[in-house]
Amino acid sequence: MPAKVTDEKCTGCEACIDACPAEAIKMVDGKAVVDAETCVDCGVCVDECPVGAIEME
């Protein structure tokens, strides 16, 4: 299952974008958004998010 971002927690720091090996995350309106089709379910973004805004579905 792809990663999911909780908008209310996301601060827009872009740490997940830098960490994502599949380049599946982009910023939309200052929040991270995961492209479910591109996400390889590795969980790296979950570990890199400093505010815990990302989790695996």
Image (cartoon, helix red, strand yellow):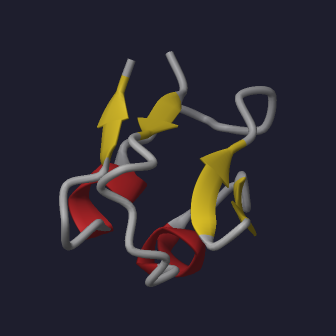
Q: Is residue 39 left or right of residue 48?
A: right
Pick the front one: 42 or 5: 5
Classify 9 as above or below 34.
Answer: below
Q: Where in the figure is residue 41, as x and y percent of width and height?
A: 50, 32
Quadrant of the image containing the C terminus: top left
Residue 36's x, y, as percent?
71, 28
- In this rendering, would 57 be left or right of 41? left
Q: Quadrant of residue 11?
A: bottom left
Q: Residue at x 72, y 67 (%)?
A: 29
Residue 2 vertical position relative to residue 46 in the rendered view, above or below: above
**Number of marks in the image?**
0
Q: Nearer the viewer, residue 1 or 50?
A: 50
Query: Closest to the observer: 20 or 50?
Result: 50
Question: 44 above or below 2?
Answer: below
| Residue 5 picture location, percent across and down | 45, 43
Left of 51 or right of it: where is 57? Answer: right
Q: Position of residue 25 (x, y in %)?
A: 67, 57
Q: Residue at x 75, y 39 (%)?
A: 35
Relative to 7, does residue 15 appear above or below in the rendering?
A: below
Residue located at (44% from left, 84% from top): 13
Q: Residue at x 78, y 38 (%)?
A: 38
Q: Is residue 43 left or right of residue 50?
A: right
